Amino acid sequence: MSLTMDKLLNVDYDYIINRIIGFISSYVRDAGASGAVIGLSGGVDSSVTAALSVKALGANNVIGVIMPSMATPKLDVDDARRLAQMLGIKYYEVPVDGIRDAITKAIPVFSPSDRLANGNILPRARMTILYYFANRFNMMVMGTGDKSEILIGYFTKYGDGGVDLLPIGDVYKGQVRRLGIALGVPQDIAMKPSSPRLWEGQTAEGELGVSYDDVDVILHALVDLRMTPEEAVKATGKPESAVMAVWKRVINSEHKRRMPPIPRIGLRTVGLDWRMPLNKEG
């Protein structure tokens, strides 16, 4: 078996679009919400999520929130505005530097040298803002994480990972780019290098040390096809170091994909053997 990115990209995008549109529409309806709020970054994931939400709910029922920091390039803000205007949705701009500064000043052990801890303040502040909009207008927060990011844990726990639903959470990064083109997202946005913009000059692939094309193919082998790392090396032709680096990220980030664990005490334990259905009549 030979796994390539071309094979992974050769999927039915019309089916994906229709499946996700139906999912968003039914989920929001069953929750009794009036629409969706989305953090617009100017990147492909948030743009595709916004376009799908508009198709599912209508432009009048979708709000975009642009939340730049000093690490956000002007191009990203311009692209986020352009995308919102193209989709015809209402959008707001809420700079987050002041919020981050207030938080850091209040933390007695704050250290300016801890780049990761400091960077993670931003997505958590942004999610607080998005949930304010959601509460204010009876909306649901649309997550913008894709399958690649979710599997390797490339998101902030209770930041961009703390959302109501993840419409593109089963679509790999490369597929999301093609999905964007199919939805009419401008090509320069669809193909823009991904970055969470937690600090200046940050890019996802630079931090990961592996291209997203390689990540996608490796994950497809390890997760979808349930190959061992050794089998994935042979099937993908990727270096063992790359396969093991991706696999290590999947293993080490499992806690991000789960609800907080609860020790069993009573007859029915929340999240283990008892869940209330979303639609109580269903």
Image: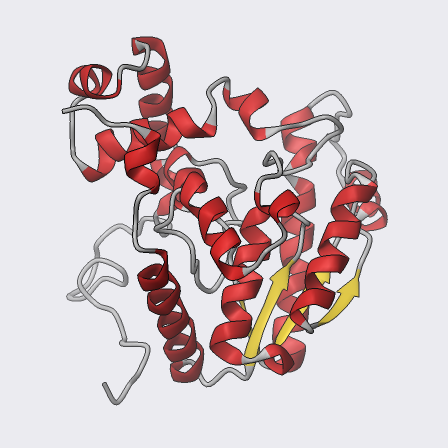
Residue 228 as seen in the image, left or right of residue 188: left
Residue 103: x and y in percent read 77, 45
Residue 23: x and y in percent read 36, 71
Residue 234 as seen in the image, left or right of residue 125: left
Q: Residue at 57% of width from left, 48% of height from top? A: 44
Eyeballing the image, is 10 above or below 228? below
Count up the numbered dots.
0
Residue 66 seen in render: no
Residue 219 as seen in the image, left or right of residue 145: left
Residue 93 as seen in the image, left or right of residue 282: right
When asked about the image quadrant of residue 220, the answer is top left
Name the image quarter holding the C terminus.
bottom left
Residue 239: x and y in percent read 32, 10
Residue 179 seen in render: yes
Q: Residue at 56% of width from left, 59% of height from top? A: 184
Eyeballing the image, is 261 above or below 248? below
Direction bottom: furthest residue: 281
Q: Residue at 47% of width from left, 57% of height from top? A: 182
Eyeballing the image, is 163 above or below 11? below
The coloring applied to the image is: secondary structure
Name the image quarter holding the N terminus.
top left
Q: Residue at 55% of width from left, 84% of height from top? A: 34
- Nearest the viewer among 185 and 21 is 185
Residue 206: x and y in percent read 58, 21
